Structure formats: structure tokens, C-alpha cells
Amino acid sequence: MQIDQQIAEIQNIVDDVLTMAKAKGATEAEASMSKVQGIAVSSRMKEVENVEFTNDGGLGISVYVGKHKGSASTADLSKAALALTVEKAIDIARYTSEDPCTGLADAALMATEFPDLELYHPQELDPEQAMKIAIEAETAALDYDERIVNSDGAGYNANQGIRVYGNTHGINAGYPSSRYSLSCMTIAAKDDDMQRDYAYTVSRRPDGLKSAHSVGQEAAENTVSRLGSRKINTANVPVLLDKDVASSLFGHYVSAISGGNLYRRSSFLLDKLGAQVFPGWLNIQELPHLKGGLASSSFDAEGVATKDLHVVENGKLSQYLYTTYSARKMGQTPTGHAGGIHNWIIGDTGHTDKALLEEMGTGLLVTELMGQGVSVVTGDYSRGAAGYWVENGVIQYPVHEVTIAGNLKDMFANIRAIGKDRDVRGGVQTGSVLIDNMKIAGS
């Protein structure tokens, strides 16, 4: 069946359950349905370990009886099961407490235009080819260096699916998407030292992935480079967050400006709209309609139209992120962020990765972060880290078993530079981030 026909079928199902909900007494209703096909292959030591096929689908519906909400879901798409699901949602709504902030987003905010964002690039889900790719990556890693003594495996994943959202304001829209990824993790040993590291690639397009050979070699190269890791003395020094981990820094910023934390008064950036948070040269844009973007969408999980936003302008907090519920709690307008952000592009200072090391001079290059020691309420930040000690802009030796600590307010304000070579494998696209000064807890 053609993809357009599949989308039309799902839209008909969504329309049917919305009609049923209204007939059973719902004031408003919304429904979403997804259908995903996929394959996941893992190998270990050049042998296939697992082959998994996915063929999932399900529908979820939320109904509003006045200001009472009820939700239910089903994987059974027969007419009887759908009718029962609607009835359960209605029953739940009748027993829930009234909430003046609940309900659909205003009809005027619904998406009305649905351009092709080039998110769907189908390819036959061929297990033989998937096995070949995974084993090729692992083979390249194991053959890279005699110090690569073991493997934690390689994995190839391919998913192709459809998402449809509709509500009683009249929106009933859907689109197909695809996602492919390949990863490899290896173990290196020298004398009594053992280290582990990995590499991965992800894309909407199968031909957008790095080659299996290069992923395997990168994993092995990363792992070998960590042999001989040392502890370092406690110090206050500049820290360079490698682009592979730098997106997590802006992930904390996302949490701090999200409506859910704001209306609960649990964010250190509450009441800071317009305040200087980052250096004046830093801008962050959100581009939801980026062609082929891993976080692109014409509408959010509530049907609200997405649009380009200047999230940070000249270092100032220029935009909070609201769902419908959090917007009503705060007396604001939804911003199209139910379900998350959409392609954040972090500004840069034009530095290459080599130039960032030179700019740092002496300090710690962080390539791995561990633990969850971050408080969005206070901004306090403390995480385990590993990476490389740098002197005079040159990497000296690998470092492990240290903790980097500070406060997000200071970390954001003290960003000295951001690299131009961005990691584009997620919803936040950023280069490596150089922070002027952080506490390094070591020996």
C-alpha cells in the first residue's frame, strides 16, 4: 500500500474516534496514532547476536467533558476496541477533578500548512544487509589496533513510521518519517588498563549515515586514545565540552525555560525573560521546518503550528517554551513545544576544534559526562567526567574519574567560545563549548 493511502486510512480512524467521542458527550477531544515498522540488528565479536523486527501501532485519545479530562489508548484498532477505548476515556473524565487549565489549544493556533519536510526516505528493511553493516563496523573496529581486545557490540537500526494527530478543532494531519542509525562500542586493554568508548551515526536517510567502516574505526580510535587515563589534581580551570556532549548543556537550558518547571516555580530562570543569560554574541535559533531535520515537524503534539523562533538573542533569554497547559497556568500563549523542541541551532564563534584547544590553553577537554547531578531549581551542576588534559593548546594525556562542578548561571555566562563544527545528530545542533572556569574535583 502506498504511504499516502496508509496515512489516509489512519486519518479516517482518528476522525472516527473523534466523532464517537463527541457523540458520547465529550466537549472536546484529540487523538493521535502512530504506526512503525523497523529492524534492529546487533552483533558481537563479528557474530550476529540479535535480530528484531518491529511492527507496532497504537492510538491514544484524550477527551474533555467541560474541564474534566480522561485519556485511554489501544493497540487493537477494530471498531469494537476503538469504541471501548473512547468509552473508557469518557468514563475517566467523569471521575477526574475539574481543572480550569485543561483542554485543547485555541483553534486559531492549530497548524494549517503541512509542507514536505523531507523526513521520509524509505528503504527495504533487509535483515541480511543490516547484519552486514553491523558486522562490517565491528570488524573495522576490532582490526584497527591490537589493543582492541573485545567488543560491546555494534548495532544497526532502521525505523519507518507514520504519525497522525487530530482534534475536534478540525485538524487531522499526518506525515511519514524514517530514521537510521549505526553504533559500535569497543574495549581496549594495555597492561592492567582497560577502557571503553564508542561511535555512532544517525540520519533520516540511509545514505546519510557514515560508512560502517568509518564508524568502527572511530570507535576503536576513541577507545585506544583513552588508554593510560590518569586522575588529575583538584583545580579551577577552563573546560571544553566536546561537541559530542555539549548538547546536554543546552538540554539543561531547555528544562529551565520550559513551562512545566516555570509554573511549578522550580527553575533558576523563572522571571528572567529578557535577562542576559549568555554572552552577548550568542544566539540560538529554533528551526522546526528544517528539511530532513531529526526534530522537524509542522506541528507539536497538540496540533499547535510550529514556527521559527529566536530562543536566545544577543545572549538574552527571549523565549519561554509553553505547552497549552503550562501556558494557561502562566497566563501565556502556547509556543508549539508539546513533545519537545524542534532543531535548535546554537551560534558559534567560528573556531575550529583545533582553535578551541588553542583558545583554552591549559584545561580539561571533556568527551564523556556521567551522572545526573544537575538541579534546574538552583542551577547547581556536578557531573562525573572523562576526557583529556590540555596544555598550551595541545592534548597531553587522557583523564578519568574526575567531577566537573559549577552553577549553570555562571557556566552559561562564562562561555568563551563555541566551535563552528556542529554535531547534528539530535535536536540540539552545537559545536564544542569552551567555558572559562569550572571546579575540577580530582585527586
Image: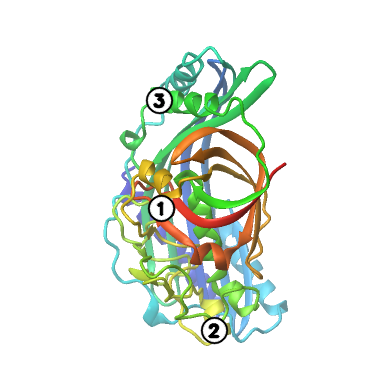
User: Which is closer to the viewer, label 3 or label 1?
Assistant: 1
Q: Say what secondary structure mark 3 lies in.
A: helix
Of the image marks 2 and 1, the number of the one nearer the N terminus: 2
User: Which is closer to the viewer, label 2 or label 1?
Assistant: 1
Of the image marks 3 and 2, the number of the one nearer the N terminus: 3
Question: Residue 26 sits in which quadrant?
Answer: bottom right
Give residue 156's position: percent from left, percent from top. 47, 30
User: Which is closer to the viewer, label 3 or label 2?
Assistant: 3
Against 288, is 321 above or below? below
What crowding class fits label 3: few (fewer than 14 Cα within 10 Å), some (14-19), or many (20 or more)?
Answer: many
What crowding class fits label 1: few (fewer than 14 Cα within 10 Å), some (14-19), or many (20 or more)?
Answer: many
* CA–CA distance in space, label 2 to label 1: 32 Å
Q: Residue at x 67, y 53 (%)?
A: 372
Label 3 belongs to which residue? 212
What crowding class fits label 2: few (fewer than 14 Cα within 10 Å), some (14-19), or many (20 or more)?
Answer: some
Quarter of the image where the C terminus is located: top right
Residue 441 vs residue 276, the one in the foreground: 441
Residue 368 vs residue 181, the one in the foreground: 368
Amino acid beneath label 2: Arg
Question: Residue 425 sits in which quadrant?
Answer: top left
